[in-house]
Amino acid sequence: MSFIAQQDRRLAPLWETIRTHRFLLSTRDGTLPPEVFATWMRQDYLFVEAAIPFIAGMIPRAPRRHWAPLAGVITALEKELQLFEERAASVGVELRGAPPAFTCHAYVQFLLGTGATASYAESFTVLYAAERAYHESWKVVQAGIAPDSPWVPFVENWAGPDFGGYVDFLAGELEALAAEVGAPERARMAELYRLSLLYEIAFWEMAVEEEGWPGVQDDLAAKGDAGAAGSQDPPRRPDSAWAHMVPGDAGASPPSPEPTTGGGA
Ligand code: MP5
């Protein structure tokens, strides 16, 4: 059985928790309070900002065939930040200035710590798990969200075919890396996969619970103006952040068509 299939079987309850999370179901149904969505937007903006140095830090240890794809991810994340900025402006949400909530801070430290100290295959596992989790999560929202919801551009970003193709590419590469490493490293990859899914669940919880920091009343978290979601500009359809990751896209730096076996930069 492939590495991912093995992990998905072991971690099926975590995947089920993600796919049935109330943040996603109520975003799909249009019943999520706008201020909860605004909290997620502010915190995920911080997460995506941190994902850029995480990816950049992987490049020196990456096999040659991953250089262009990883550079392409950085470009996509930049475009994703613009998507957040455009959506926040459209619904009147102040995106910047909120300090990280406890869970966001922990997940970012996990991401950057893994990127700095773990092996390339281990870091790549965390990348795959986070991207796959968002693809699965937003597909849940996609299955029923109103077409005029202001959150449709987020659905298109993570549930769309461009991002789906990128996640498939990551899956193939992760399998190749898992096949190359020894049993102890594969066990660490499995544990990082599990931890990533736990952080993904915690991240949705953080938004729904309007979480601060444990043990203190005022964590200085500026909640900002939640805006009036749905009442302002209709969503623009920004260019897909991930289009250039699709193989064959003209002028792009697509994932390498080279074989996935062999390693080392
Ligand atoms: C992603 C994200 C997807 N934006 N936030 C969390 C908490 N997990 C995964 O990553 P990306 O890099 O925005 O595609």
Image (tube, helix red, strand yellow):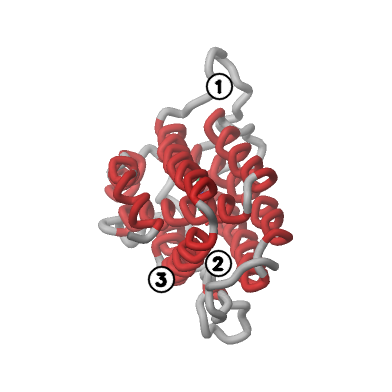
Residue at the (54%, 48%) spot, across then down: 185
Could you say whether the residue bearing mark 2 is in a helix, strand or loop? loop
- Which dot marks residue 100? none
In the rendered image, the vertical position of residue 191 relative to residue 244, given as above or below: above
Quarter of the rendering containing residue 124: bottom right
Lower position in the chain sequence, tag 1 or tag 3:
3
Name the residue tied to disc 2. Answer: 241
Residue 26 position by quadrant = top left
Quadrant into which the C terminus falls:
bottom right
Q: Which disc, if any, is residue 213?
A: 1
Mark 2 within 8 Å of ligand 1, using the beta carbon: no
- Tell me residue 238's x, y (percent): 52, 68
Amino acid type, mark 2: Ala
At 54% from the left and 57% from the top, the residue drawn is 181
Looking at the picture, which amino acid does disc 3 mark?
Pro
The amino acid sitting under disc 1 is Trp
Taking the spot 53% from the left edge, 62% from the top edge, the residue there is 180
Q: Identify the residue position indicated by label 3 in the image.
A: 161
